[in-house]
Amino acid sequence: MPTEFEVQGLRITDLAEEFGTPLYLYDGDALSGRMKDLRDLLHPRLEVFFSLKANPNVAVCSLLHAHGARAEVSSLAELATARRAGVSPEDIVFLGPGKSREELEACLDGGVYTIICESFGELTLIDEAAAARGIVADVALRVNPEFAVKGSGLTMGGKPRQFGIDEAQLLAAPDLAARHPHVRLMGVQVYMGTRILSEGAVAENTERILGLAERLAGTLGFPLDMVDIGGGLGVAYFDNESDLDLADVAARINPLLDKFASAHPGTRLVMELGRYLTALAGTYTVRVRYVKTSMGENFAVADGGTNHHMAAVGIGSFVKRNFPIRVLNRLDESASGDWNITGPLCTPNDTLGKKVALPEVRPGDLIGVARSGAYGPSASPVNFLSHGHPAEVLVVDGRAHLVREPDRPEDLLRAQRLPEGVPFGGSAGR
Ligand SMILES: *Cc1c(COP(=O)(O)O)cnc(C)c1O
């Protein structure tokens, strides 16, 4: 066993030296391997769309795309990222409950495959924007279904929600298409929730969503060019969790997809995945600055913390559950005590790991939080205490590439203004 963490043969101490810390390190083989597993195991008609929300890095998106992923985006910047990553418009879907007119217009002008519409008000706006352009917009309906399926960390369906349109409201609107002449309804999307770790729940969701799509398309009289079955496949983070068995997922959903695909030979079948594609590929790496004890507990204070990795705080549970954490430069040493791993913020919540069993931690050590490639910096308060965004490095074919420069103080100050002509202006203090 190597005595230190390596990515494709590159040693963490060298990478930390070259790129500095704190650092998000992504293993390109883990990203491409994930796509390969999905392609090998899941029904060939099922297309994987990468939810950029989970990791909006353009290089990560580009690598996934090179291995077959399309893109699901929710903002102008995500749309631009997907395009720059090489995803063509016909392989991009745009969703989100609060789309602006500008975003809808960008979808129409950029020719994205479909806008996934989440409210009647949005449908009206799409209709107007398309009319102004003299075009007909392809729109899929995001449905908030009546049913809920257990097994998701965060449920999105079967409850009062700001997402999608209630199934009952849609079924009660058979003239929906007629009332929107510049919209062509052509698909259905349902997203049941995130962090699903039950193969049975994935299958049940899929079965119900496919049924719902047929019912809805029948009642409202539109073709099913696309059915997006959501996804929400999770990864295990904590001790009491275990990873999904993808072969088992496939064994359960492929027959459902097969039946549907035969009945609907022209329908694109879509699964949106964020976390499942990127989580395992990423290691958040910080360097220990100080070690100390306080009232009998050990603390390792590192150069990065929850400002880059809010998920590690373990929100939502009373007992803090830790992500997998290791001393990356001394993997061969066994645990000798419990350590609180904290960051540079001035808040007690800035704790990456609480009472983690580790070997004796020393200043200069590199601590790694594994399984951190999803919902990292972009889902964290990176500007809290103005430390800014960390560096991101992607290893491909045994070579490390800086794919995101860390913010510098001037980057954080660039967008701020001192008002002119006021007594507290820039030179007032002199
Ligand atoms: C967040 C989100 C995703 C991605 O979820 P993961 O759990 O990361 O796969 C996909 N679709 C929708 C609608 C989402 O809101």
Image (cartoon, rainbow, N blue to C red):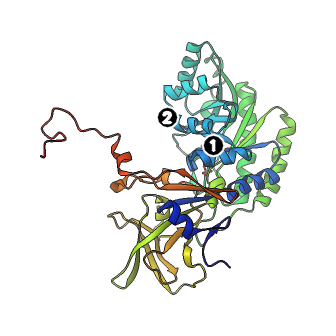
Q: Give neighbour class at mark 1: few <14, some 14-19, many 20+ (Cα, 10 Å).
A: few
Most distant residue in the right direction: 262
The image quarter containing residue 333 is bottom right
Left or right, 129 with respect to 382, comes to right
Amino acid on which the number 1 mark rests in the picture: Glu
For the point 50% across and 26% down, which residue is it?
102
Label placed on residue 80:
none
Query: In percent of the image, x 60 and y 37: which residue is there?
Result: 84
Residue drawn at 54 percent across, 84 percent down: 335
Q: Position of residue 345 (x, y in %)?
A: 35, 63
Query: What is the count of numbered marks?
Result: 2
Which label's residue is closer to the chain start, 1 or 2?
A: 2
Return the residue at label 2: 98
SS for callout 2: loop
Q: Is residue 234 visible?
A: no
Estimate the x, y position of residue 199 in percent, counting from the top left.
Answer: 73, 59
Residue 216 visible somewhere in the drawing = yes
The image quadrant that residue 1 belongs to is: bottom right
Callout 1: SS: loop
Label 1 sits on residue: 146
Q: Give the residue type at disc 2.
A: Gly
Task: State how far apart marks 1 and 2 are (Cα).
Answer: 22 Å
